[in-house]
Image (cartoon, grey):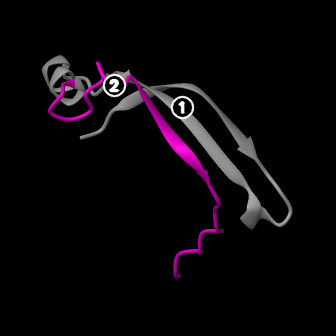
Amino acid sequence: MRGTFAIRGGTVEVTEPPSGSRVHAEIDAVSLRTGNARRDATVRSAKFLDTDRYPLITSPPTGWAPLRSPAP
């Protein structure tokens, strides 16, 4: 399943070295859109995201590491 969420807010902190950088995002869970209204309602229901109780999805700030280049 593919879908989109609206981003409510967030921050990106880039440091030197980059491994100390942080990203924090706040996503509006109710904004889920997959192109199928019935599926969207099911995913937003208490069975999955429970957006009535948890309207906001947050990502805790974590570090990151550089991606490796794919093998040739």
Estimate the spatial distance between the alpha carbons at disc 2 and disc 1, rounded to whole Å.
13 Å
Near-viewer residue (15 or 3): 15
Tag nearer the camera, 2 or 1: 1
For the point 54% across and 31% down, the residue is 26
Where are the magenta residues, as a range? 45-72
In the rendered image of this protein, does residue 63 appear above or below residue 60? below
Give the dominant element type of the magenta stretch: helix, strand or loop.
loop
Residue depicted at x 52% and y 43%: 59
The answer to whether residue 30 is left or right of residue 23 is left
Mark drawn on residue 32: 2
Name which residue type carries label 2. Answer: Leu
Q: Is residue 1 above or below residue 72?
A: above
Q: Is residue 13 left or right of residue 5?
A: right
Q: Which residue is mark 1?
A: 26
Is 68 in front, or is 58?
58
The question of residue 61 being in magenta is answered with yes
Mark closer to the chain start, 2 or 1: 1
Q: Amino acid at mark 1?
A: Glu
In reply to whether residue 62 is colored magenta, the answer given is yes
